[in-house]
Each structure stands twice: as structure tokens, then as C-alpha cells.
Amino acid sequence: MTRRRQEAAAGPLSLFASDNYAGAHPEVLEAVAAANEGWAPAYGADEWTVRLRGLFHGLFGAAETFPVFNGTGGNVTALAALLRPYEAVICPETAHINVDECGAPERIAGAKLVDVPTPDGKLTPGLVRSRLVGLGDQHHVQARAVSISESTELGTVYTPAEVRALADTAHAHGLVLHMDGARLVNAAAALDVDLVELTGDCGVDVLTLGGTKCGLLGAEAVVFLRPELAEGYPYVRKQGTQLASKMRFVSAQLLRLFEDGLWREAAGHANAMARRLAAAAAALPGVDLAYPVEANAVFLALPAAAIARLHERYHFYVWDDDAGVVRLMCSWQTTPEDVDQLADALRAAVVG
């Protein structure tokens, strides 16, 4: 599989290239403006960060929360806190940490990634066990963590039972389960469950909780659902350049998203727009859904000529050049009119 990531040209619309392309939610901007009033202690001693820790303790059960700037930084520092230099992370071949973080886990966390091919972006207990080799042998890297993405890079979603099965497998072999939750909110909204039902209740040990893809300016959090694993993380976060001095602005964003359910509204809307797009696309001749549409991503298999024609109007990523698979993302900001216009353009590209 070959992926082609190209930057947007001046002309084509970029509405569906990524949920990162969407703006910040107006209510989040209001929260940042409110946090800008007056003076506040730095480095997490502010009232917003204190409230956030309390909020997440309630949302996730016993938890230690650390705001960070971005998903890569969150993933890398979380893994760095878990691993010794001779230990490894088992992850899907398509995982963000394996494909889209420019080797940061290897270079900064010093972690060997043991990647596993999967048909749908999801690990299974059997796939994990297939990589548990050389345990106790000083000549082999030692598996220490399993990392999964929720939702996955292919837009698929782990059910609570699937997450629990992976956690049980990891724990049975002395490993920890890390979740890259860049789009956890989309998965939870799709399954109509609370966040803890996909994380702490299922045995997830450490969570990188995303917010930027759901309307934040740039805010994520590393949440240790087993608090004893957080020992030393403040130093790892500082060394990993993820400690915000004016942390109130990071925490204020996370508070607004998670304090009264804004995340569910925003993520649910993005998911609904993806379903609308998938239904329109599936009705067209010569168009196939490459993967099930379970969150806010739509992967379509298109003829090469149709991809070229669609690219004249829209910027999006070609996920698999060989198979003609493209990725179209919906966000909190996507409107039904946006989707319908894309569907019309897709129809013209395919039929025309």
C-alpha cells in the first residue's frame, strides 16, 4: 500500500481533507477568552488545571491527568514513561505512532515499535500473542506495551468487549495497554457510551486523550488510569517539551469540551455527516466503501480518473494509490450542505 499525502493547493476546497482542518469551536474560543482574564499561576497550578484534574477523576475514575500540546507529544511522552530502553510497543501497522509521527516514538521515547498487519486497523488478542516472542531472552527486545487507536486510522471502532479482551491479554503477559484516543470521542459517540466505558472500565492503563480533532485550538491530555504508572511522568513531560507554562489556556479548552458533554454533540455531528456521505457515495456506480464507516472517516475506492477529477475541486488524501482508496474526513464543522455538494461532485467525477 502506498500513501500520498499532498498539501492543499490554492484552489481546491479542503473541507474533507482532515478533521484537523476545521476551525476551533466558538464555545472553546469563548472559554479561552474567559481564561485570559487576570493573572494565574503557571505550569499547572492554575484553577482551570485543578478543575480539569478533578473533572477527569470523575469521568475516568481514579486517574492522573496531564495536559499536553498535541497528540504526538502525548503519545511519545506517555510511552516514554512506560518503557525501559530494551522494551517495545506492539501496535497495528497502520497506527499513527508507526506511520505519522516521523519516527518520534523511536527517537524520543527510544521505543521499538513491533507493528502488526491488520485487515481493519484493529488488533486482536491473537495478533498480540503472535508478537510475544523472545520474552525473557536477553537477545530479544521485550514487549512492554500494546498500543491501539480509538477510533482507528481506518475509521473503525473497537467495542468495549474488544478493548477488554486486549487489556486482558496484555495484562496476562505483564504488559500495559495504551490507547491513542485522538478520536476517542468519535468512537464513544458512535457506540453511545461514556468515555470510561471504552477506557478505564475496559482495562486501559494509559490514555492519550484527543481534543484538537474535535474543535480545540490545540490541546490533548495524557491520562493515567492506573495512577501508579504516572510516577516520573512530570519529568518526562518536561523533557519532552510538553509542559505548558500558561497551562490555563490548554486546560480551559479541555474543560469546555468535556465538562458538560460538548464533545458528544460535536463528535456525534461529525459521525452523522460521515454516514450521510457514505450513504450517498455507496449509491454511485463504481464506488465502494473500502472500510466500514463507524466514526467520522469515509474511505472510498474510486477509479483513478474519478480521483483526478475530484481533486480538481477538493483537496483530500489518497490513502492507497494502488487500490485507488481515498480518505474523506468529517468534523464538527461539516454541514449537510457541504456533504451534499461533495456527493454531487463525486457523482460528476464518477459518472461524467
Image (cartoon, rainbow, N blue to C red):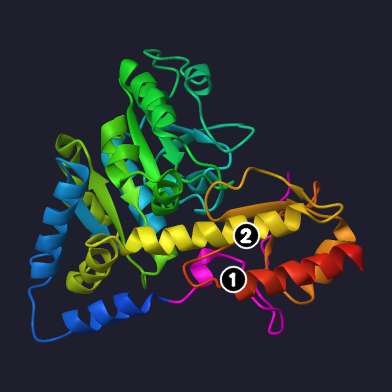
Percent of width and height locating residue 189: 41, 51
Relative side of 316 to 269, left or right: right
Which residue ends up furthest to the right in the rendered image? 352
- Calculate the distance from the C-alpha at mark 2 to the C-alpha at mark 1: 8 Å
* Residue linked to disc 1: 336
**2 or 1: tag closer to the N-terminus:** 2
Percent of width and height locating residue 254: 26, 64
Image height of 131 relative to 91, above or below: above
- Taking depth in this image into account, of 297 and 339 the one nearest to the observer is 339
**Element carrying mark 1:** helix
Percent of width and height locating residue 1: 73, 44
The quadrant holding residue 243 is bottom left
Start-end of magenta stretch: 1-23
Image height of 233 relative to 126, above or below: below
CB under 8 Å between discs 2 and 1? yes
Q: Amino acid at mark 2?
A: Arg
The quadrant holding residue 258 is bottom left
* Residue linked to disc 2: 276
